[in-house]
Amino acid sequence: MASLGQITLPRAPSLEMSLLRRRFNQPIKTRIGFNGRIVSKQAQVSVKASVSQKVIEEEARVLVGTYARAPVVLSSGKGCKLMDAEGKEYLDCASGIAVNALGHGDPVWLQAVTDQASLLAHVSNVYYTIPQIELAKRLVASSFADRVFFCNSGTEANEAAIKFSRKFQRFTHPQDKEVATRFIAFTNSFHGRTLGALALTSKEQYRTPFEPIMPGVTFLEYGNIQAATDLIRSGKIAAVFVEPIQGEGGVYSATKEFLQSLRSACDAAGSLLVFDEVQCGLGRTGNLWAYEAFGVTPDIMTLAKPLAGGLPIGAVLVTEKVAETIKYGDHGSTFAGNPLVCSAAIAVFDKVSKPSFLSSISSKGLYFKDLLVEKLGGNVHVKEVRGEGLIIGVELDVQAGPLVDACRDSGLLILTAGKGNVVRIVPPLIISEEEIERAVEIMSHNLNALD
Ligand SMILES: Cc1ncc(COP(=O)(O)O)c(C=O)c1O
């Protein structure tokens, strides 16, 4: 018998089993420590008894294999707790990758979704709908922006920002034969998987299988002011894309000086500055918008993940000078900003944007980081604990996968980031102090056990 995490697979040479073994390549019946030592035997669940196992087998048969999923089938959630199909409970410090800001099943969010679903879910952007305008009013009133474009995901938001930047340059320099069409992005950046956003994403292995992708992107070192300002001065740059805090890339914060220098260089050269706040925006850092901490505003900001509390949404916030260059037909989307997602987003926004809620994120984030330093900081593998608010990274001198797997088996969901050496903690913003203490306890226990 070979095992897939906690689940035991028979040796029968079925297609599903061989696919599963190939895709997950999990240790057999044992847990392996950082140094390759066997540290524990894993519990075995019989294939027949497990609903999860059946789902995992069926997934391997019918879905395109784009995801190396953890071997867990989640079936319900409440607050920061998730349940799998066998009733095992997990503490959620992943939030569906920084999405479930209000946790699972928030009553106000639920009411907004069910009320709107029973009234009107979708009509397309051929017509006006009230929730879309109400949400846009809130986003504009609370930010640097004058106008909003809605879409359905983070990558779509960046795709729209690419098009808007190119259109802005063409519109403002109609006579220019060599209009600025190039982009700057940074090391460790993640902007999405569609061909434009992918071209701005630093990991080469995500890009190369799909070449040729959008040309004209230069990657510079995140934080390197000289390199960025020199290139922006060349005058060929349509826009600079930057995450004020990088999530996927390993939880790295920009410095004030870096973002302020980008702002001044873009202003001088006529380039646009785009902040990707898909992961770090909407309260995650303790400010409503991450850029607030840097004293810099962008020309364009992209949002997505937490905005509708788990329903798919993206948004591009722009200044008037950008918006006035966009005309009917330049861009659009069938689903974008429909009444259902916008009603959900209004419920999320109205809760998260309250000053008392935002300050609770900052204080819980500090508490989380302090506890991590106290309980994990002494471990030889821990290099740094960093982050802002409730986006926290624990950098290790080894791969973080074994720790993330061990924590999951102990009932805690966390993520990896960076080159696989960073543990990323992005819990629902409603997490309690007791839940933070429990999460750190599970991490500390497993980190020491893996040593
Ligand atoms: C900063 C950032 N931008 C863009 C994206 C892409 O978002 P989506 O997966 O919704 O397309 C992500 C996703 O992780 C992200 O973290």
Image: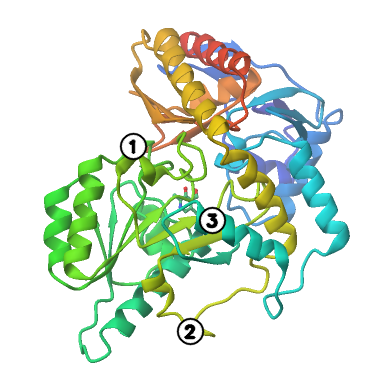
Query: Are the residues tagged 1 and 2 within 8 Å (C-beta)?
Result: no
Instruction: Tell me the quadrant of the picture where the N terminus can be found.
Output: top right
As drawn, the label of residue 139 is: 3
> Residue at label 1?
252
Q: Residue at x 30, y 78 (%)?
A: 169
Seen in the picture, residue 211 relative to 354 is either above or below; the reply is: below
Question: Is residue 120 among what the camera can see?
Answer: yes
As drawn, the label of residue 26 is: none
> Residue at label 2?
327
Name the amino acid, label 3.
Leu
| Mark 3 residue crowding within 10 angstroms, few (<14) / some (14–19) / many (20+) | many
Q: CA distance from mark 1 to mark 3?
A: 26 Å
Q: Quadrant of residue 206?
A: bottom left
Q: Quadrant of residue 309?
A: top right
Name the amino acid, label 2.
Lys
Seen in the picture, residue 23 relative to 4 is either above or below; the reply is: below
Measured as percent of width and height from the top left, residue 218 is found at 24, 62
| Mark 1 residue crowding within 10 angstroms, few (<14) / some (14–19) / many (20+) | many
Q: CA distance from mark 1 to mark 2?
A: 37 Å
Q: Nearer the viewer, residue 171 or 369?
A: 171
In the image, taking residue 65 as reference, residue 203 lies left or right, namely left
Q: Residue at x 70, y 61 (%)?
A: 131
